[in-house]
Amino acid sequence: MNSGAQAALLPDGRRLHLHHGPIDIIAEAFGGADEVRLAYQQAARRFETILAPLVDELSLLRAPIGEPRPLPKGPVARRMVAAVWPHRAVFITPMAAVAGAVADEILASMIAGRCMSKAYVNNGGDIALYLTRSEMLRAGVVNSQGRAAIDARVELKASMPVRGLATSGWRGRSFSLGIADAVTVLARDAAAADAAATVIANAVNVEHESIARRPANQMRDDTDLGDRLVTIDVGILPGELVARALDAGAAQASRLRLLGLLEGAYLALQGDGRVAPPEISLSQRRSG
């Protein structure tokens, strides 16, 4: 492939690996062998052209969202703006939805014209889903992005209005203004989940001497957060502060659900957690 994008089947022969610069994707389609092969070819062709248009519009995508609504040229950039636009009352940039938007775009290309029962595109933990009829997928949920262990699982059924999930927190690959170990959001698509997870993770917050923060631009030159303080370490917190931080995040999650911006969220901090709304079913949950 030209452009530096790489596409190859993983050793299991079932899953497709796509890699280019900061983008690292695992995708899987379920269906007849020929349909899956064609789906992977379509995904690989689209992946070749994903990164360059984003780079071309970085100045717009790194700017805080607000009036007037930005009008980016690229389809992935448009997905990003659409995902963060409902959150414009708080500080957020389109980059908060980049991983989810890329997952959504690759999934759309992969399933176009193909006959498959289900598929997913996992872009570093931000996942776009395709489910037909009575199909379902199980997704792992973590209490901390700093550990590889799965702490809980959620069943995502075709009957649910969920086609994307994403996780954010201070331990993740992106900066966070809050102190959540992990916030996992279920939403209508991966970009919407990505943006909502960022907003909720920022809301899981308190002040305490054991929390270390630094200006984002001192940590990374190309950050979209400027000199805003981002969390770089969280020491052991008193239980009442953990509860207060999680309550603040859960309140934000409930507000976003009432606005139709997510279907549910799981928030974790130092072994404690909140499920919003409480009726979301998680299985195989272990203590953090």
Image (spheres, rainbow, N blue to C red):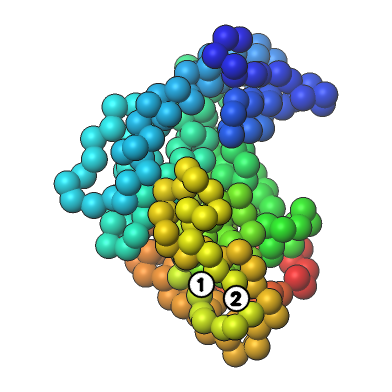
SS for dot 2: strand
User: In this rendering, is residue 281 above or below 218?
Assistant: below
Q: Residue at x 38, y 64 (%)?
A: 256
Could you tell me how many numbered marks the image carries? 2
> Is 69 left, or right, of 76 in this rendering?
left
Quick check: can you spot residue 2? yes
Name the amino acid, label 2.
Answer: Ile
Name the amino acid, label 1.
Answer: Val
In the rendering, at what x and y percent does residue 91 appear? 34, 60
Q: Which residue is mark 1?
A: 204
Q: Residue at x 34, y 27 (%)?
A: 74
Q: Nearer the viewer, mark 2 or mark 1?
A: 2
Disc 2 to disc 1, C-alpha distance: 13 Å
In the rendering, at what x and y percent does residue 52 appear? 45, 22
Quick check: can you spot residue 268? no
Pick the front one: 64 or 193: 64
Q: Residues within 10 Å of mark 1 (few under 14, many from 20)?
A: many
Pick the front one: 9 or 92: 92
Tag 1 or tag 2, which sits nearer the N-term?
A: 1
> Is 122 left, or right, of 57 in this rendering?
right
Q: Which residue is mark 2?
A: 211
Pick the front one: 96 or 209: 209
Q: Residues within 10 Å of mark 2 (few under 14, many from 20)?
A: some
In the rendering, at what x and y percent does residue 69 appear? 21, 44
Asked if the residues shown at circle 2 and circle 1 are in contact, with their CB atoms under 8 angstroms apart, the answer is no
Going by the picture, which residue comes out furthest to the right? 11
In the rendering, at what x and y percent does residue 26 appear? 66, 32
Which corner quadrant of the image does residue 116 belong to?
Answer: top right
> Is 233 left, or right, of 255 in this rendering?
right
SS for dot 1: loop
Q: Look at the image and tell me in which quarter the N terminus lies.
A: top right
Q: Residue at x 52, y 35 (%)?
A: 103
